[in-house]
Amino acid sequence: MENVEKKLQEEAKKLLADKKVDVVIGYERGTLPLTATPVFITDAGDAEKLVYDATCVQNLAKYAHDIISAHREAQKKVKPEDRKNKVVGVVARGCTTRSLVIQLQERQYDRESIVILGVPCDGYIDPKKFNLALDGEQAAEGSVNGDQIAVKTLAGEKKFALKDVLADNCITCRFNNPVISDVVIGDKAPAKAADKEYEKVDAFEKLSTEERWAYFTKEMSKCIRCYACRNACPSCYCKVCFVEQTMPQFVGTSAEQTDTQIFQLLRTFHMVGRCVDCGSCVSVCPMGVDLRNFLKKLDKDALELFEHRAGASMEDVPPLSTYRENDKEDFIYNP
């Protein structure tokens, strides 16, 4: 990804210098070894801060939406003749571009408000898997060299394969290249072997109703209602979340098991036709709740029933926004 990183810096610098964007959202090196964190660059001279490799975890579409929305709200206080548009440049891999497509389809902002710097993706490191691979040791230094990771700890040096610590959603990703972009950076990433994409969902579907509910209640009993999953999700941008609405009140804010289950059920169903399997919710969950299995179940249903992949293209209308006479309707009678 070294060449991609250099080209990315050059393109970002040019966009900022030519005043084509007001800010570029990307990644910079984190304070800990083998980590990256979102960065918001407004000066062309700072473009060299940008990095791009397997340590870049967050879906940056979340920040693109929030910046544009905040600017739009602020402009309401400005005289109409003095209002200005804000153009955001965003570094976007496959899943990020799918989230941007969804935001555009849901008319959260105009296409002219974003400049998409499309980058290929070979997957990102799952922090939880990485920590397990270190056996509890603290990384002092680290580097990604091709398909290998080298880490120095107080106990010595460790090396392991990158594929062993990739996030689950990256292993079977069918969209590891941008689906939409204004600037294409680097060559296309090779296609993933995605034949086992729904393997876990298939196993889950074979369980009895009682067994599936038991698994759901077991997983949700871990949830502490920190809302990290909601806050990190690029498709969660309601001005008032149903959890915090009081008139009427849909769900309690307590840590009661039923309230937690309702929160997770409703949030999951809000993702119908909108989850791009970027893994943001899973990566930020401090309790390790298996959110992805339930979201992938909905993803599989949307594909089989409506031939729809969330955010796959601007022309592919979300399933809950359209109707076709040849829609498969067996599910209405056989849930």
Image (tube, rainbow, N blue to C red):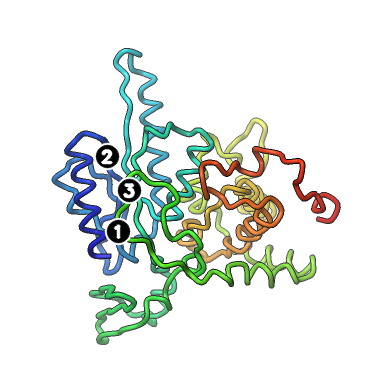
**Mark carried by residue 272:** none
**Farthest left residue in view:** 45
Q: How far across and how far down the image is residue 25, in percent? A: 31, 46
Q: Amino acid at mark 2?
A: Val
Question: Is 126 on the left or on the right of 102, as rendered?
Answer: left
Upstream in sequence: badge 2 or badge 1: 2
Upstream in sequence: badge 1 or badge 3: 3
Q: Is residue 333 above or below residue 22?
A: below
**Mark carried by residue 117:** 3
Which of labels 2 and 1 is toward the front? Answer: 1
Q: Amino acid at mark 3?
A: Leu
Residue displayed at 43% across by 31% down: 110
Residue displayed at 30% across by 58% down: 186
Task: Give the class, few, some or many, for how many residues have Cα within 10 Å of label 2's Cα (few <14, many ≥20).
Answer: many
Q: Where does label 2 land, which residue?
A: 23
Name the image quarter holding the N terminus.
bottom left
Q: Where does label 1 land, which residue?
A: 186
Work out how far the residue at label 1 is from the one at label 3, CA to CA, in angstroms.
10 Å
Name the image quarter holding the C terminus.
bottom right
Q: Amino acid at mark 1?
A: Gly
Work out how far the residue at label 2 is from the one at label 1, CA to CA, in angstroms.
21 Å
Which of labels 1 and 3 is toward the front? Answer: 1
